[in-house]
């Protein structure tokens, strides 16, 4: 049974196998992406540009995690039950990402006209910021879930 990619709702097709890397090397890009998400969100002054960058980076990191989980499933390194648990956690991320993207679209389309328009736009901006702040937490949960699926290996043979 082919797993479905929860983000695109189509069968996952891994393509040619990729060379295996050391586990520690896989964590570095995820950690860097998370730090970059936080930095971009809090350090820059252009809210819209940074929000869309945050959404894009979060989506890319999720797709990398989903790809790793799908490969592990296809290689029988994780069970169907573990794949299902990852899919449920992935659906939570997708729902949060979609909410943040929809809020951002609404924010972009809103026009501040008068004091009530400015107040409404500021409230919407806070909701977008709160939705974006959930992304690193959900991604960390997905990383931790995948790490919990990893089977400990015995000592390396010389």
Image (cartoon, grey):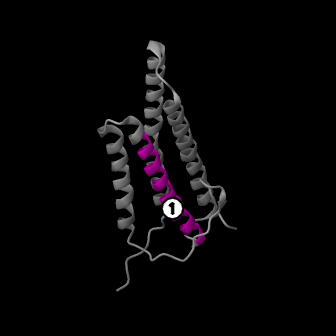
According to the image, label 1 marks what residue?
A: 149
Rendering coords of residue 44 (x, y %) = 31, 39
> Relative to residue 134, is residue 12 drawn left or right?
right
Rendering coords of residue 35 (x, y %) = 33, 49
> Relative to residue 80, is residue 149 drawn left or right?
left
Q: Residue at x 31, y 44 (%)?
A: 39
Rendering coords of residue 153 (x, y %) = 43, 72
Magenta stretch: residue 70 in it?
yes
For label 1, count other residues whose C-alpha is less than 10 Å away and answer few (under 14), some (14-19) or many (20+). some
Q: Residue at x 36, y 40 (%)?
A: 41
- Quarter placement of the C terminus: bottom left
Q: Residue at x 34, y 55 (%)?
A: 32
Residue 16, quarter of the rendered image:
bottom right
Magenta stretch: residue 100 in it?
no
Q: Is residue 89 above or below residue 106?
A: below
Q: Is residue 88 above or below residue 23?
A: above
Magenta region: 51-74
Q: Residue at x 54, y 41 (%)?
A: 96
Of residues 30 and 79, which is closer to you in this image? 30
For this orientation, the residue located farthest to the right is 1
Q: Main secondary structure of the magenta part?
A: helix
For this orientation, the residue located farthest to the bottom is 158
For this orientation, the residue located farthest to the top is 115
- Quarter placement of the N terminus: bottom right
Rendering coords of residue 58 (x, y %) = 45, 49
Of residues 62 and 114, which is closer to you in this image? 114
> Relative to residue 119, is residue 75 drawn left or right?
right
Residue 15, quarter of the rendered image:
bottom right
- Classify mark 1: helix, strand or loop: helix
């Amino acid at each position: 049974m082919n797993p479905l990619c929860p983000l695109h709702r189509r069968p996952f097709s891994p393509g040619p196998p990729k060379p295996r890397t050391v586990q520690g090397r896989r964590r570095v890009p995820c950690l860097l992406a998370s730090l970059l998400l936080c930095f971009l969100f809090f350090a820059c002054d252009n809210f819209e540009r940074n929000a869309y960058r945050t959404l894009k980076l979060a989506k890319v990191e999720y797709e990398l995690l989903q790809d790793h989980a799908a490969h592990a499933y296809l290689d029988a390194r994780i069970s169907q039950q573990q794949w299902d648990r990852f899919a449920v956690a992935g659906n939570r991320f997708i729902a949060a990402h979609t909410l943040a993207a929809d809020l951002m679209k609404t924010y972009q389309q809103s026009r501040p006209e008068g004091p009530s328009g400015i107040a409404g736009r500021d409230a919407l901006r806070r909701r977008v910021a709160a939705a974006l702040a959930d992304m690193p937490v959900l991604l960390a949960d997905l990383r931790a879930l995948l790490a919990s699926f990893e089977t400990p290996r015995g000592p390396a043979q010389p």
